[in-house]
Image (spheres, coloured by chain):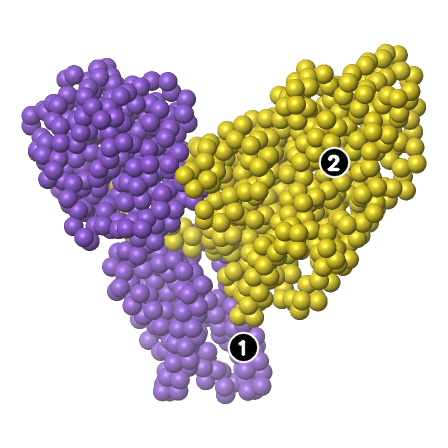
Chain colours: A purple, B yellow
């Protein structure tokens, strides 16, 4: 025995060491992925560590029922751990969309990996028990086990995740796991039974992981596509936001920072409701201002009125307006509105621009993103509306997209009440836009020369709005909220309402 | 982002990002050793010129000026006195200032991204009783009018935008600077008891109807119960009242360092309580404890006050002797630009200078001054490319780390109406709280700027581990005599009274250090009161 046995023992101990390393890596991968995809990292990590350790216990318990072919089982388990652990991250990424099943699969994978890793150590001790003194055996096995764990926990955040990514890391360690099995197949030829079959299994598994490893980049982007549930046809990260355009059958959807901006199937409802009430009530529409709305769809509606002489669009993001001036698909949507000679585009901060401009407008259409953070909240403040008032001609009409009165009634009426402090006439209305849900607007007039029921001009060919404003300003009880504060720069109460209401969904 | 159904997915994305960032960023940073080249500049009050007072080898006056009224010192007191003189119809006066700029502690700096304070940076909403201050704010359109109930309507853009304050406590940012999330029940109970005591102090009046704690200080009660609070330190008082929980003590210590430069161990208990109880929070309907602020801090107020002394100021002029002679008040002044001296003869002189300066201008005043302690301060304005933290609560105007040695930092662009800033500008505050302010000051003058850089960055690292990598420049501003720091027995002590006594009805003293509390309101009233006394 002598030397040969020494080699045998150290080989197996080295296997313990890699198992421990790989096992912990799988656990860390699962924890990271769970916090990455589900959030709440403390909870995810805690649960995963718990489940993992528990299932190791279960594995250890069942090890006593394995009495035959110990070495073969050991190698097979090694292959299995490599395969399951290695593929776990890929499986989790791809299945992320179905959230409930996702958690189940997550814990199932953690459980299986844990069980298998739990089986290995007792198994190994059984293999070695007759060949090594018990005292040495226990001490060696556990020493290598814990060293492996330490190595994994250090390597994982410092080198593995930054260099390989999460999917890459788990696949890489799966391959290491299986390589050990392959090496064992060769070195312990004489001790193993059915070596060829075992070797074939190992090599096949290894190749599966290898191929997946090379395609892991594609898996990630496929997964982003799955997140949208549609084919991504265009992505672009501008200085301010990430623009994603998707296409599914005849429907195009534009997402800004993952929030749906419009769906080509029903955006006409939104934009007709946004633009036409104000345009029809205003005394004159010579000079129209649009704040936000860099997609040019509101401008498209405005330009339907031939008496419009000038449209000014102020949108922060040059990347956005440029895209809607040049991209063929998108230019088709807005009917080339942003390239129209009546239209001037300023890529400026709307608040600052409004403070500085001296021009007066007859209609103002405000189409800002929802007040989901404190920066955006400023654009819905009392001071902002006072600033707007300075830009209006007598009897000008202002309309503001004001989120959903159904999902967020407090936010909706908060904006309405804030606007009420500034303008003599004010009303609210809403429209159903299937891709958004029930959506609302606040409308105000800067004088008494016109009112909400006046129709001073119309255009033909609208599919949704019929110039009967009174059909749109009725609110059922589930869209009403009382005792609402005014949104000011120094309280930003709207952002709090908004967070509370959308956070509940 | 009209985001109906998809909002929850954006939330999920946020958590994805959060999870990934939480895990990866700090660890990544730990192994990244980046060589950082950042720009550090060191500035401060002109102590070099100021220290010439000790040697006094100035040239003989080569010029003489006669003027009815002379104000010495262009801080808030001096500027407020100039305003009050103008209001009384007096236009013949002169104001002399040592520095190149006016405003004293209410000065500012500016870089290509933002203005930033070089001292005081906010004004709490005034007490409703403080009619003079309310009037000033109305004149300057900070108050836009009054509502039907008589409450002032403050300009929304000059009130601190929400969210205004956050605290880094137990590895998370939380809203407000009082530690709230993560306390034990006992700790919460102590905080509650403390604040309820402060609420009582806030409304407490003596038999004459005077508040125990008021602004200006001069209007506070002087009864024995009040004075007894000035006989011990804040720490002793807290102990007496059986306050011992760490969150409360650390919080109160922070407040005292922030307002007086001295922690609870050294500051008078009266001053400590004054911080909480002197502002009556009665100028708004909802008991608002908001404050007024500007990117440049109180330099905005300096700017408003400055117009009253326009064309009547001599800057870079060091007064080195003041005396009475032949029934007139005389000041000898060194012009640092031309290196010549002038003699200014006035009917009355207003000394709007701190007492540590006055001791060199008058004979036999050193003894009088030894009870005046001034804590040194350090301000560091950083330009950062990004200011990431763990996103537990968004960036606020005032950002404080619980238990830090410094006083946290102000986000200087917080009052900007803009959506996005290319670079962020923050100003970090540090006060040297010790029993021996003089020693701290002398030590501070010797330290190189690298020392200050690491002091600032190390402290900021508590809440922003990667601050060093994102910092592009640091402007360090040292204030040797940052502010008067009221140790026990100073506020109601004799030295303060004696130092305030005028000389021969010719020379009058006014400065916030004579109030004992270094806040805008005190200086503002010192300036008004001294003029009212003269005329």
Q: In the rendered structure, the residue with mark 1 lies on which chain?
A: A
* A188 and B385: which is toward the camera: B385
Count residues near mark 2 (Cα–Cα under 10 Å), then give few for <14, some for 14-19, many for 20+: many
The residue wearing badge 1 is A142
Q: Residue B499 placed where, x, y %?
A: 83, 39
Which of the pair B510/A408 is nearer the observer? B510
Spatial CA distance of label 2 from label 1 is: 74 Å
Q: Quadrant of the N terminus of chain B?
A: top left
**Displayed quadrant of residue B479:** top right
Asked if A217 appears above or below B503 in the picture, the reply is below
Question: Image quadrant for the C terminus of chain B?
Answer: top right
- In the image, what residue occupies the spot 7% across and 25% down? A460
Labels 2 and 1 touching (C-beta < 8 A):
no
Residue A19 seen in the figure: yes
Q: Residue at x 60, y 30 (%)?
A: B301
* Residue A196 figure quarter: bottom left
Q: Residue at x 92, y 32 (%)?
A: B363
In this rendering, would A405 be left or right of A383? left
Q: Which mark is residue B511?
A: 2
Residue B120, percent from left and from top = 64, 38
Mark 2 or mark 1, whichever is nearer to me: 2
Q: Is residue B45 visible?
A: no
- Name the spot of residue B79 as percent of width and height, x first: 68, 27
Q: Nearer the viewer, residue B450 or A25?
A: B450
Quarter of the image where one finds residue A463: top left
Residue occupying the far top of the picture: B63
CA neighbours of label 1 inside 10 A, class few (<14), some (14 to 19), many (20+): some
Q: Secondary structure at mark 2?
A: loop
């Amino acid at each position: 025995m002598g030397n040969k046995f020494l080699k045998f023992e150290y080989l197996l101990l080295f296997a313990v060491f890699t198992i421990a390393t790989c096992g912990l890596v799988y656990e860390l991968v699962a924890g990271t992925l769970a916090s990455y995809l589900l959030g709440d990292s403390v909870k995810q990590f805690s649960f995963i560590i718990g489940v993992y350790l528990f299932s190791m216990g279960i594995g250890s318990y069942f090890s006593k029922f394995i009495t035959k072919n110990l070495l073969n089982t050991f190698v097979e388990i090694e292959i299995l751990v490599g395969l399951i652990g290695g593929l776990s991250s890929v499986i989790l990424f791809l299945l992320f969309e179905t959230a409930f099943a996702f958690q189940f699969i997550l814990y199932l994978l953690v459980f299986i990996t844990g069980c298998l890793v739990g089986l290995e150590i007792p198994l190994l001790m059984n293999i070695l028990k007759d060949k090594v003194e018990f005292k040495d055996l226990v001490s060696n096995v556990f020493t290598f086990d814990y060293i492996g764990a330490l190595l994994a926990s250090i390597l994982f955040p410092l080198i593995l995740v930054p260099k390989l990514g999460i999917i890459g890391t788990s696949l890489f360690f799966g391959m290491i796991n299986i390589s050990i099995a392959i090496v064992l197949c060769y070195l312990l030829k004489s001790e193993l039974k059915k070596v060829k079959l075992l070797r074939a299994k190992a090599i096949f598994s290894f190749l599966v992981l290898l191929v997946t490893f090379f395609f892991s980049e594609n898996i990630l982007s496929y997964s982003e596509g799955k997140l949208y549930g549609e084919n991504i046809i265009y992505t672009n990260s501008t200085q301010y936001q990430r623009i994603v355009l998707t296409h599914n059958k005849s429907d195009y959807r534009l997402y800004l920072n993952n929030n749906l901006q419009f769906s080509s199937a029903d955006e006409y409802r939104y934009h007709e409701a946004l633009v036409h009430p104000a345009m029809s009530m205003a005394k004159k529409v010579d000079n129209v201002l649009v704040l936000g709305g860099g997609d040019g769809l509101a401008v498209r509606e405005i330009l339907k009125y031939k008496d419009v002489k000038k449209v000014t669009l102020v949108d922060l993001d040059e990347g956005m307006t440029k895209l809607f001036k040049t991209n063929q698909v998108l230019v088709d949507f807005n009917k080339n509105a942003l390239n129209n000679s009546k239209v001037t585009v300023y890529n400026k901060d709307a608040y600052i621009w409004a403070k500085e401009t001296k021009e007066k407008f007859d209609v103002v259409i405000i189409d800002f993103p929802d007040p989901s953070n404190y920066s955006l909240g400023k654009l819905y403040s009392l001071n902002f509306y006072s600033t707007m008032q300075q830009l209006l001609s007598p009897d000008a009409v202002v309309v503001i997209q004001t989120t959903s009165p159904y999902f967020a009634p407090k936010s909706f009426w908060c904006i309405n009440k804030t606007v009420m402090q500034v303008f003599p006439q004010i009303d609210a209305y809403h429209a159903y836009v299937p891709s958004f849900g029930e959506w609302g607007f606040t409308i105000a007039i800067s004088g008494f020369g016109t009112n909400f029921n006046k129709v001073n001009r119309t255009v033909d060919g609208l599919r949704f709005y019929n110039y009967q404003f009174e059909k749109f300003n009725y609110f059922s009880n589930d869209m009403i909220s009382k005792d609402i504060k005014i949104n000011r720069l120094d309280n930003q109460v709207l952002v709090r309402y908004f967070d509370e209401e959308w956070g509940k969904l | 982002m009209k985001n109906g159904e998809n909002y929850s997915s954006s939330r999920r994305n946020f958590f994805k990002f959060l999870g990934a960032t939480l895990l990866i960023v700090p660890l990544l940073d730990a192994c990244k050793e980046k060589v950082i080249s950042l720009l550090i500049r060191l500035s401060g009050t002109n102590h070099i010129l100021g220290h010439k007072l000790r040697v006094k080898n100035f040239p003989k006056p080569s010029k003489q000026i006669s003027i009815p009224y002379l104000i010495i010192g262009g801080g808030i007191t001096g500027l407020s006195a100039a305003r009050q003189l103008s209001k009384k119809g007096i236009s013949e006066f002169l104001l002399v200032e040592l520095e190149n700029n006016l405003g004293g502690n209410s000065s500012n700096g500016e870089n290509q991204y933002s203005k930033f304070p070089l001292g005081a940076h906010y004004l709490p909403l005034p007490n409703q009783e403080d009619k003079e201050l309310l009037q000033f704010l109305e004149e300057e359109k900070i108050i836009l009018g009054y509502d039907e109930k008589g409450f002032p309507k403050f300009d929304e853009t000059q009130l601190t935008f929400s969210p205004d304050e956050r605290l880094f406590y137990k590895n998370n940012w939380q809203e407000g600077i009082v530690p709230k999330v993560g306390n034990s029940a006992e700790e919460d109970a102590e905080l509650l008891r403390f604040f309820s005591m402060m609420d009582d102090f806030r409304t407490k009046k003596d038999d004459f109807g005077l508040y125990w704690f008021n602004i200006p200080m001069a209007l506070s009660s002087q009864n024995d119960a009040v004075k007894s609070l000035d006989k011990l330190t804040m720490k002793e008082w807290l102990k007496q009242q059986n306050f011992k929980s760490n969150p409360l003590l650390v919080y109160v210590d922070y407040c005292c360092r922030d307002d007086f430069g001295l922690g609870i161990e050294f500051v008078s208990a009266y001053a400590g309580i004054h911080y909480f109880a002197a502002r009556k929070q009665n100028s708004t309907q909802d008991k608002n404890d908001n404050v007024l602020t500007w990117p440049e801090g109180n330099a905005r107020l300096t700017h408003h006050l400055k117009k009253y002394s326009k064309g009547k100021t001599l800057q870079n002029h060091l007064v080195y002797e003041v005396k009475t002679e032949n029934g007139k008040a005389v000041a000898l002044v060194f012009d640092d630009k031309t290196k010549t001296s002038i003699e200014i003869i006035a009917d009355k002189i207003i000394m709007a200078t701190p007492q540590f300066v006055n001791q060199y201008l008058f004979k036999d005043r050193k003894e009088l001054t030894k009870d005046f302690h001034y804590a040194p301060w350090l301000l560091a304005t950083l330009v950062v490319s990004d200011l990431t933290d763990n996103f537990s609560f968004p960036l606020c105007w005032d950002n404080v780390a619980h238990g830090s040695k410094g006083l946290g930092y102000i986000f200087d662009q917080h009052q900007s109406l803009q959506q996005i800033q290319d670079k962020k500008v923050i100003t970090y505050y540090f006060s040297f709280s010790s029993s021996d302010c003089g020693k701290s000051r002398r030590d501070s003058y010797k330290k190189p700027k690298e020392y200050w850089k690491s002091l600032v960055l190390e402290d900021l690292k508590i809440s922003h581990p990667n601050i060093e990598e994102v910092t592009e420049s640091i402007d360090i501003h040292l204030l040797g005599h940052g502010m008067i720091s009221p140790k026990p027995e100073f506020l109601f002590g004799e030295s303060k009274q004696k130092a305030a006594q005028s000389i021969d009805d010719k020379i009058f003293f006014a400065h916030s250090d004579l109030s004992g509390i270094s806040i805008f309101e005190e200086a503002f009233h010192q300036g008004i009161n001294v003029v009212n006394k003269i005329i």
